[in-house]
Structure formats: structure tokens, C-alpha cells
Image (cartoon, grey):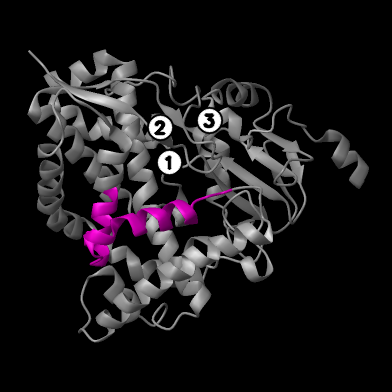
Amino acid sequence: MTNSDVLEKRAITPFDVSEGALYSENRWQEPFAQLRREMPVSYLPDSPYGPYWSVVTHDLVQKVELDPKAYSSSYEHGGITITDSSGEYEFPNFIAMDAPTHTAQRKVVQPSFNPSEMLAREPEIRERTKELFDALPVGGTFDWVEEVSVKLTIGMLCVLFDFPWEQWRDMKRWSDTASDVSPDQSEERMQKFFAEMYQMLGKFDELFEQERKQPPNDKILNRIIHSEAMGNMPELERLANIALLIVGGNDTTRNSMSGFVRACNLFPDQFELLRNDPSLVANAAQEIIRWQSPVTHMRRTTTRETELGGQIIPAGEKIILWYISANRDETLFPNPDVVDFTRENARRHISFGHGVHRCVGARLAEMQLAVLFEEILGRNVRVEQDGPLTYSGSCFLHEIDHMPVKMVPIG
């Protein structure tokens, strides 16, 4: 088959699903549903991010994730977002690396999120959640995202990193900056981006040096600085891995916490179900992570010609794995747009990735969500939306930016 034959047989998508307006206007559902029905693997020859392939069904997203040799995550090939990294703007953190470096660095941080560590963290998570809710107005309107989702997740990061709480706004700004995926790769924007990132690095280098003076322990920064794989990382690699840990520990949980309140307002019967049967809390957390899909996409790059979903994909092509679509795949999740806290296979969502790159902090996110749900149930209040919400226009993170609510006592 000639190159022209391959090009002619490509399934050309009628949608640019990276378009920010699809997400800010919350109308991404139908384009992805059509792609799942008609072309689960499709090609877009031109976009603000350049040409890319879309993979939109659950089975094919998993297939790509389970073949890291054919589908690279490495920053050297483009990294893990739809934007292209190259030259001085490479971002070499361990999620944007292939084996063996990815494996070695992941092993350093993984123990900080194992079950025993999470069990030890749970009392503090519960206490912080309780204190935050004690300070919220009952009956008064406030922004759920700013007052709850942001503060709970940033607070957890401050605990994990021994970061001063009074500087939490810096942590939030660095997280928002690091996760800002945009087609604007201008020199001006990138200079502002790295100015923030190097400010972050300066603060964390101080924390690293404090840990270097301590004996090895299970704190995450201590494990990093005392490890062979990460203890002497070059400056840019150190910066990129800090950014990864902040974004990974913040945005997934933050967006799911906001998604829970949105879901309970759209599907009030499910909140009542949860009130009547708190044993559903753990499964409800999984269902919210599926339904919200806090990470919209991840990217891979083909290392060789490969076949996927009936499409021949050459080496060096950008492959976008649309988690937000895979989590609404009708062939796996019946009535996928509906929140169902009794959904038997909710845990099969792909929001944390799959295979070697599955999120190391998944258990922490699940625990934080479960504690939040239980706190709301224990207070016997309903969190009611009290005005229009706004969504981010990001095609990387599925974010609710603002959501006015009020807590209303039940009964």
C-alpha cells in the first residue's frame, strides 16, 4: 500500500475536539458520541495544536495505554499533552518518560501513596475537612470551587510536602500555571510560564534541602532527595517533576469534588440514595470520577507504524487519548451521561489512566472524595447550586471554574 493509499483511507474527523469552546460551553458530549459510533480512531489534519489522531472508545484507549513501546509518553517525542514540547521548553517529568527511567522514578514516589500511608493520612484528612466545613456559612451563598474544592486539595498538598499553609495561594497559582494547556506557544507566554515554574522550584529546593539533612523517611520529598533515581535530577527535570506532583495531587481531586456537587444537583435522586445508604460512598466516588472525567486527555506518540481501530498510523504521529469520551462509552457504561451511584462497573473508568502510567495518587484522591461525601452526609445538609456555573475552556482538564452554592439544612 502506498503512502497516498494510506492517506486516502484515513478516517477524517469532522470535529476538532480540542476546541476550547466545546468545554467552556459544556457541549462536548455529542461530538464524542458521534465519533464513538462512527470513527473510534480518526485523524484531524489541521488544528491550532497541529495534526492529531483521536482515540475515543474505552477499549482502544486501554489498548494504547497497554503498549508503551509502540505509543511513547516521552517528552523527547512530544510528551503527554496535545501541545508539542521541544527544545528549551521540554518538560521532562516521569509521567512524560518511557521505561526504564519512568519505572525507576515512579518507584521512588509510589510508596508515599501505598495503602498504609493512606490509612495514616485519613484522620488528618477528616479533621481538615471538618474544620473547613465548620467555617462555611449555612444558608449563605459561596463559591464551592474556591472555598471547598481548592482549599481541600491544596491543603492536602501542603501536608504532603510540608509546605506552609499561609502560602497556599502560591501553590494554587503554580498548579494552574503548570496545567495550562494552550495552543499559544509564544515566547512571551512561555517566559511567563517558566518565571512561575522557577519561582516554584526555588521554594521546593529549599524544602528539598531541609529533607536532605534529615534521615531517610517516607515523606515524599525526603524519598525523592535520598533516592538514586531522583536525588540528583537536573534543574529542569526537578522542576517538571514538582509540577507533575502538584498538578496530579490537585486538579483531579479538585475537579471531582466540584463534579460531585454538580451531579447531586442534576441527579438529586442519587444524593437521596447516598443519604439513605452511606455504604455506597466508595462506589459513588468512583462514579463521580468516571462522570466528571477530571483529566480530559492524555497524549502518546507512535514509535513505529501501527494499526489501531482499523487505521494505519505511521511512526511519529500524535495520538490523543480522550479519557472524557472513553468514560462515556455506551458499550461499557449503560446510560453513561447519567450519574448512578449503584453502577456496578464504575471502577472501570479510565480517569487515572491504565497500565504503567496509572496515577500513583489514585488512592489518595478516592479517599479525599469519600471523606468529603461523608462529611456532607453527616451534617445533614444539601449543597444546592445557587447561580450559573462556569467551565474552563481547557481541553486537558475538565474543570468547573466557579459554582455558587448554598448549604441548606435537610428537614
Q: Nearer the viewer, mark 1 or mark 2?
A: 2
User: Residue drawn at (40%, 26%), measured in percent from left and top?
Assistant: 389
**What whole-number distance in Å separates the C-alpha atoms at marks 1 and 2?**
9 Å
- Indicate which disc residue 281 carries: none
Tag 2 residue: 292
Say few, some or many: other residues with alpha carbon within 10 Å of mark 3 (under 14 / 14 to 19 / 20 or more).
some
Residue 394 x, y percent position in the rendering:
54, 40
Q: Is residue 173 magenta?
A: yes
User: Residue drawn at (23%, 70%), measured in percent from left and top?
Assistant: 219
Tag 1 residue: 351
User: What amino acid type is highlighted by mark number 3?
Assistant: Ser
Q: Quadrant of the N terminus?
A: top right
Q: Which residue reaches farthest bottom?
A: 213
The quadrant holding residue 97 is bottom right
Q: Quadrant of the C terminus?
A: top left
Question: Sequence-wise, which precedes: disc 1 or disc 2?
Answer: 2
Q: Is residue 325 above or below residue 225?
A: above
User: What amino acid type is highlighted by mark number 2?
Assistant: Gln
74 sits left or right of 207 in the view: right
| Nearer-the-camera pick, 278 or 250 | 250
Q: Do the numbered discs 3 and 1 sit on residues whose CB atoms are within 8 Å?
A: no
User: What amino acid type is highlighted by mark number 1?
Assistant: Ser
Tag 3 residue: 24
Q: Nearer the viewer, mark 3 or mark 1?
A: 3
Say few, some or many: other residues with alpha carbon within 10 Å of mark 1 (under 14 / 14 to 19 / 20 or more).
many
